[in-house]
Amino acid sequence: MGSELQKELDPLENARLQFEEAAQRLKLDPSFVQIIKEPRRATIVKLPVQMDDGTFRVFTGYRVQHSIIRGPAKGGIRYHPDVNLDEIMALAAWMTWKCAVVGIPFGGGKGGIACDPAKMSQGELERLTRRYVADLIDVIGPESDVPAPDVNTNEQTMAWIMDTYSMHARHTVTSVVTGKPLELGGSAGRREATGRGVLFVIREAAKKIGLSLKGAKVVVQGFGNVGSVAADLLVKDGALIVGVSDVKGGVGNPKGLDLPALMGHLSEKKTVAGFPGGTPVEGKKILELPCDILIPAALENQITHVNASRLSARIIAEGANGPTTHQADKILNKAGVMVIPDILANSGGVTVSYFEWVQDRQGYFWREHEVNERLEHIMVTAFNDVARMAEEHKVSLRVAAFMLAIKRVVDAIQLRGVYA
């Protein structure tokens, strides 16, 4: 049983199953499937870095370009002790499908360094970042591969990357990364983009099933950047937030939580746990609270075959990457739950990253309301494209999203031809 569950929780395995199910239904030429399954380039770099005590440590860094068929590779860079090549390859493939499903002209990429940033000083992290970029100077670039922040990296990391790349280029190249500070060519609306995108697809899904957002009960697992922004915007649409949680605990109130008071508690205590306006909820139990809409915006593998049948939500919008396992998907699909898959639901972030890249390249920046309007247009179009594919092929939104993404990549290969 242990190995069975382990297999269910393996993100690489889940990515493979999702891809294969969709590819089978498209009845693709097996040679094209082979081409799009494999990453085009995987780079491993050994990075000697001088630590604050004068000693040197060698770190291992990765950058994988899964596909550049539809445009430059696009994807984040994560700093984490568990970073390895398999994980980065799976995440790079996910980025290919995520960019294709929303129709933005990027391929998929991902990067990472196996390190523990919690045990490193700011100076050590800066030296590590700059060495990583210097070693990848021929791999990344505005036309070839555009990184972004991910786990344990942020605006500051992106500023170091941009500066290092620019020093080698001998002129400032803001478009080499996205997720930068506004002062260095970042985009207005980028911080809220993923949560705002979640709101847009929930609106469309609610229309599809005849659910009014006014008075709809919403549970948010993971009250970080994505979850808190989505919750705030849903409240403005008249929804009730009946449960929220973070890594330290959760709180529920069937009559609706007072969001401004909750935000005040969060900024003071750095957690939603212990908020007096509701009752405590432990761990994954938050997912099982009675609600209409569930937003898992925390970690992967939160909804498994163990708890899927206990969920009451009619709509699940995946703010996180990979929160639902392949087995849980089958259970939810059978129960008639509409699951808006991660590659669609949380693609608002990469969409506004695309806007940032466009603005940097033209040297002209849009106002926030323009960014939000363009984001809404892309997310609504993508949701309707996926919903149409789902109805046409009688499949779930997840299978439809993968089918649409894979078809767009294969169409591009067929039009371009294979250079040999």
Image (cartoon, helix red, strand yellow):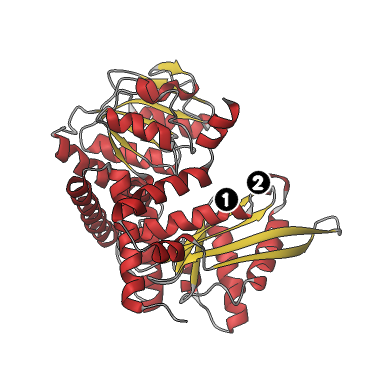
Where in the figure is residue 235, as x and y percent of width and height?
Answer: 26, 34
Which element is circle 2 on? loop
Q: Which residue is mark 2?
A: 82
Pick out the residue farthest to the left: 210
Residue at 35%, 63% in the rendered image: 29
* Residue topped by disc 1: 87
Discs 1, 2 touching: Cβ within 8 Å? yes
Q: Residue at horizontal 38%, vertical 56%?
A: 98
What type is the residue that disc 2 sits on? Answer: Asp
Amino acid at dot 1 = Glu
At 55% from the left and 70% from the top, the residue drawn is: 162
Q: Is residue 291 above or below residue 196?
A: above
For the N terminus, the quadrant is top right
Identify the image quadrant of residue 374: bottom left
**C-alpha distance separating marks 1 and 2:** 9 Å
Residue 37 place in picture, x, y as percent: 46, 60
